[in-house]
């Protein structure tokens, strides 16, 4: 695959999201590690996780990070060029909403633990998982700037930010990326793409296929993607990733994969060449009524 930039890092056009390998319904650790290694074998060198990717933060916090750290340690090939992103500022309860904590002291402590979980001295990309409405953004991102100055993180990112929040964030820290939902079912971040392209900020697209409940049926829910898939003799899922990649050179989808075959399919989506007509048709498409956003 070709490379795209996140700050000073060159990463594969398609990354691997670890969320689905760490939450409820996750594969066992051995199988999850095999998926991560398959991603590396297929040219993916960008892996995204978070400290709250787990079953329950009371007993399992940091599982997603430890999984990545273990996979990289056990991988038989060269991992020198692999870039790992993680996020801090949220907890995962067994049930209910995920609470946010953007207090500087919490973020600094979380980063220290993330370094241990990943088994690294410096985190390639550390992201504020979401704004905390009870903590000024200047304080939350100020903590990340201090961590960067201390050499504990290389690049600073934000996640689940709207345009106004991103504008403010850029006045506080050297923001390298914003990680938001982007899929045929949730296009709320499309408005950010022109802005991010202008300022060279990577847009990391999570749940790029719409989440586990919709990914297998994307062509059924959004017929245009199935139509274009037929014209290119690929899958509707590959067309979704190709569409996102063609929106701008700053977009980096991070699908979660459950098998080596799925990894290979996602990687091959980067080779799909969509026409201007394809892009117009896909961008203007509307999901069917039974495909409401999760």
Image (cartoon, rainbow, N blue to C red):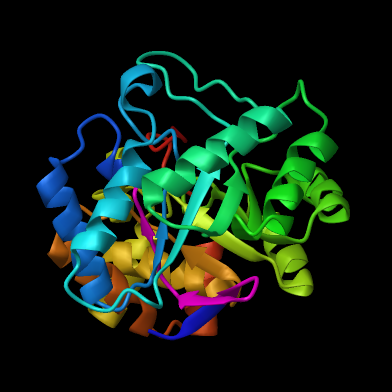
For the record, the magenta segment spans 5-18
Indicate the quadrant where residue 19 lies. top left
Left or right: 294 in relation to 173: left
| Percent of width and height locating residue 120 | 43, 57
| Percent of width and height locating residue 94 | 35, 16
Left or right: 174 in relation to 19: right
User: Is 272 rendered above or below residue 113?
Assistant: below
| Residue in the image at 88% along x and 53% along y | 171
| Residue in the image at 78% along x and 73% along y | 198
| Residue in the image at 62% along x and 42% along y | 160
| Residue in the image at 64% along x and 54% along y | 157
| Percent of width and height locating residue 84 | 44, 60
| Residue 232 in view (yes/no) | yes
Q: Does the magenta stretch include residue 11?
A: yes
Left or right: 69 in relation to 37: right
Count of numbered marks = 0
Residue sitting nearer the eye, 64 or 5 = 64
User: Is 253 rendered above or below residue 141?
Assistant: below
Q: In which quarter of the image is the N terminus?
A: bottom left
């Amino acid at each position: 695959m070709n490379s795209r930039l996140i700050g000073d890092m060159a990463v594969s056009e398609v990354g691997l999201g670890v969320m689905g390998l760490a939450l409820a319904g996750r594969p066992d650790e051995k199988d999850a590690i095999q998926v991560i290694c398959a991603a590396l074998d297929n040219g993916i060198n960008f892996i995204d996780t978070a400290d709250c990717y787990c079953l329950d933060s009371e007993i399992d916090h940091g599982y997603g990070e430890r999984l990545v750290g273990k996979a990289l340690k056990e991988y038989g090939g060269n991992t020198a060029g692999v870039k790992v992103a993680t996020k801090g500022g949220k907890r995962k309860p067994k049930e209910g909403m995920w609470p946010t904590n953007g207090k500087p002291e919490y973020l600094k402590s979380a980063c220290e633990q993330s370094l241990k979980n990943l088994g690294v001295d410096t985190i390639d990309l550390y992201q504020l998982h979401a704004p905390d409405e009870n903590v000024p953004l200047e304080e939350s991102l100020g903590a990340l700037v201090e961590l960067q100055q201390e050499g504990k993180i290389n690049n600073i990112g934000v996640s689940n930010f709207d345009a106004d929040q991103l504008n403010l964030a850029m006045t506080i820290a050297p923001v390298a990326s914003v990680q938001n939902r982007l899929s045929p079912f949730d296009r709320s971040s499309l408005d950010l793409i022109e802005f991010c392209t202008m300022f060279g900020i990577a847009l990391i697209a999570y749940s790029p296929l719409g989440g586990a409940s919709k990914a297998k049926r994307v062509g059924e829910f959004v017929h245009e993607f199935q139509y274009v898939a037929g014209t290119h003799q690929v899958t509707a899922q590959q067309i979704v990733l190709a569409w996102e990649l063609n929106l701008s050179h700053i977009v980096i989808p991070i699908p979660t994969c459950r098998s080596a075959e799925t990894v290979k399919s996602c990687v091959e989506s980067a080779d799909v060449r969509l026409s201007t007509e394809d892009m117009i048709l896909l961008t203007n498409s509307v999901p069917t009524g039974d495909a409401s956003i999760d």
